[in-house]
Image: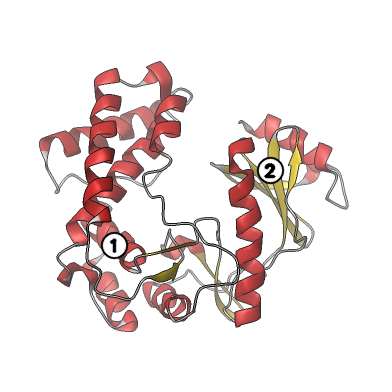
Amino acid sequence: MDEARARDVLAAADVLPGPARDARLLALGENAVFAAGDLVVKVGRDAELLDRARRELEVAVWLAEAGVPAVRAADPKARLVEGHPVTVWHRLSDSVRPAEPRDLAELLRLVHALPSPSFELPPRELLGGVERWLRLAGDAIDPADAAYLRERRDGFAAAAAALTPHLPPGPIHGDALPRNVHVGPDGPVLVDLETFSADLREHDLVVMALSRDRYAFPARAYDSFTEAYGWDVREWDGCGVLRGARETASCAWVAQHAPSNPEALVEFERRVGSLRDGDETVRWFPF
């Protein structure tokens, strides 16, 4: 889905006070995210994401009731418009500063203290999107690389299922990075709630450990995260398994953009090459 298609869907949804052409595109990935006035609208890539969009809205209502600072839904129902899920949100105030690792850690502590909600949260299907992303990549990537990632997926899925957690399992954010925290005048809030799950709490912590190791996230900043949270997941003997699973998923996620973006293909090949070589020192670049 490109921007033009997303704007067509936005116009057909008729959820904005003004013309869709005037909305500002904030992001284009699994969702196209548009802002206009005091609203933000997310347009999903395809109908397969409808259930996830519905659950994200349920999560937003639940977090609001629990008093956890997070983005709030402007409409509690997801719409399917021309084969694309559409959700409407209250726009956040402008940020007053970039989110810091400590902000994320403090929000995760709130989430990790919550009991399960009244509705069902799925397990963290970290590897569940691999097949779809590889399918979208198609002939743009080497078939041998796709086969290699499928094999890794299956191996890490089995290994993850056998882990003994250090923390009590329960609700998690699922994509716990500072970019998913917005710091406004009233303080930090969680955004991008679509990966909320019920699973090992360690999933949320491995994300930052991988950022330190693969994305050149500063060691001092990582230390501030673990200090604020109160524990370093790298001390857990299951860390390498969840890290390997996330690396596999992150590599496949980039692959889906390869057909239309040469830079995505370069990054995909960097990532899959480092996995094949077992070289954990190769830096990956955010995409």
Tell me where residue 275 appears, x and y as whole percent.
18, 38
Mark 1 neighbour density, 10 Å: few (under 14) some (14–19) many (20 or more): many
Instruction: Please identify the residue farthest to the right as the structure is shown.
Output: 17
- The three-letter code of the residue at mark 2 reads Pro
- The three-letter code of the residue at mark 1 reads Val
The label on residue 197 is none
| 2 to 37, vertically: above or below | above
Tell me where residue 127 appears, x and y as whole percent.
36, 44
Tell me where residue 236 appears, x and y as whole percent.
17, 69
Question: Residue drawn 41% across and 50% down?
Answer: 125
Q: Label 1 belongs to which residue?
A: 206
Q: Label 2 belongs to which residue?
A: 85
Image-based side of 43 in relation to 238, left or right: right
Could you tell me how many numbered marks the image carries? 2
Is residue 216 visible in the rendered image? The answer is: no
Res 95 → quadrant:
bottom right
| 213 to 113, vertically: above or below | above
Q: Which colour scheme is used?
A: secondary structure
Q: Is mark 1 on a helix, strand or loop?
A: helix
CA distance separating discs 2 and 1: 30 Å
Mark 2 or mark 1: whose residue is earlier in sequence: 2
Is residue 146 visible in the rendered image? The answer is: yes
Q: Is mark 2 on a helix, strand or loop?
A: strand
Tell me where residue 131 appears, x and y as whole percent.
40, 32
| 73 to 83, vertically: above or below | below
Mark 2 neighbour density, 10 Å: few (under 14) some (14–19) many (20 or more): many
Please state which of residues 210 and 113 is positioned toward the viewer in this rendering.
Answer: 113
Question: Residue drawn 42% across and 20% down?
Answer: 138
Please state which of residues 184 and 122 is positioned toward the viewer in this rendering.
Answer: 122
Question: Residue drawn 75% across and 56% down?
Answer: 77
**Residues tagged 2 and 1 counted as in contact (Cβ below 8 A):** no
Instruction: Please identify the residue farthest to the top as the structure is shown.
Output: 139
